[in-house]
Amino acid sequence: MSKPVDRALAAGNRQRLADYQASHFLWHVAGGVATVTLNRPERKNPLTFDSYAELRDLFGRLKYASDVHAVVIAGAGGNFCSGGDVHEIIGPLVDLPVPELLRFTRMTGDLVKAMRACPQPIVAAVDGVCAGAGAILAMASDLRLGTARAKTAFLFNRVGLAGCDMGACALLPRLIGQGRASELLYTGRTLGGEEAERWGFFNRLVAPEALLDEAQALARGLAAGPAFANGITKTMLHQEWSMGIDQAIEAEAQAQAICMLTQDFKRAYEAFVAREKPAFRGD
């Protein structure tokens, strides 16, 4: 039996986010799974300065969430995300001075950092248009379910910008390989759903009408697993990119030893002995 957490420690490090009221997208929590739905379907769900900032802050808070163990990010109306809003972001950026431009690009990068730093696995449900910053949101997720009609494009060079946006030059080659990432980032061409699955960008394809249900079912399976250990797995997957093999093996030895101290590890053993399925609690 795990000991109760000190109230002061819990107050600072444990938050319930089920009642969070989102201002610039939809937010719903059920069964340990939070669903973020980008909800501007009439414009194919573009991002704005406000939605970037709110997403950054919300993913930052997820490291303290006690009631969220997996996240789904999706778009409304048959499209994932068309990127930064042309009128509300691209237009204003043209006239900004360098310090303000850097403030913006750091904010967008901080969203990716927050997605990678939160312990919950993130499942992207990608249908239709997935372009620019939308492609980055999918890329920054841990798992990606797509549809055959999904159209993913890293469009930055099409608007006169470098492909090195929001970590794309670091993350994308690790997902699909250096040569394929280079092709997408240099050309800005669209990656169709079936090709994206072959390349490993999508974990698998599902029918459009089943996409959200499949993504949430996947997330529920993850949420029902050992949440603390899953968070360690995500941390190590991220940190080991910059490690040598020997350093990675030692880091994993330390991480696994910590996981062996959890009640979930004990529960799994006891369930195995009893020939039952373990009921993980994340502690």
Image: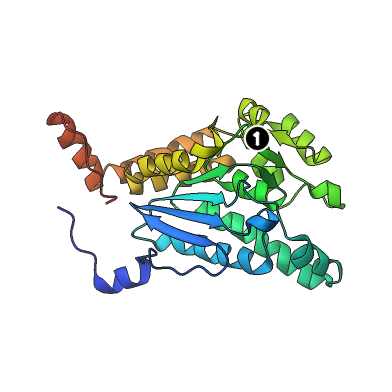
> Can I make out residue 50 in this image?
yes
Residue found farthest to the top: 198
Q: Residue 190 appears at what percent x and percent y?
A: 75, 37
Residue at x 57%, y 63% (from the top left corner):
56
Q: Is residue 219 above or below residue 275?
A: below
Could you say where residue 28 lies in the image, as x and y percent from the top left? 43, 59
The x, y position of residue 283, in whole percent, is 27, 51
**Left or right for 236, reference 196:** left
Residue shown at 24% from the left, 41% from the top: 265
Which colour scheme appears in the figure? rainbow
- Which residue is drawn at the image coordinates 66% and 64% (left, top)? 107
Q: Nearer the viewer, residue 129 or 68?
A: 129
Quick check: 216 left or right of 185? left
Q: Please tell me in which quadrant of the rendered image residue 6 appears.
A: bottom left
Residue 92: image quadrant is bottom right
Is the residue 196 above or below the residue 35 in the image?
A: above
Q: Position of residue 219 (x, y in %)?
A: 42, 44
* Rendered residue at 72%/34% (across/down): 191
Q: Residue furthest left?
A: 274
Tag count? 1
Can residue 254 be seen in this snapshot? no
Specify whether 12 is left or right of 123: left
Per the image, label 1 sits on a secondary structure element best described as loop
* Residue neighbourhood size for the residue with mark 1, other residues' Cα within 10 Å, grouped as few (<14), some (14–19), many (≥20): some
Position of residue 17 relative to residue 31, above or below, is below
Q: In the image shown, does 53 or 171 lie closer to the viewer? A: 53
For this rendering, which residue is in front, 38 or 266? 38
The kind of residue tagged 1 is Arg
Q: Which residue is mark 1?
A: 149
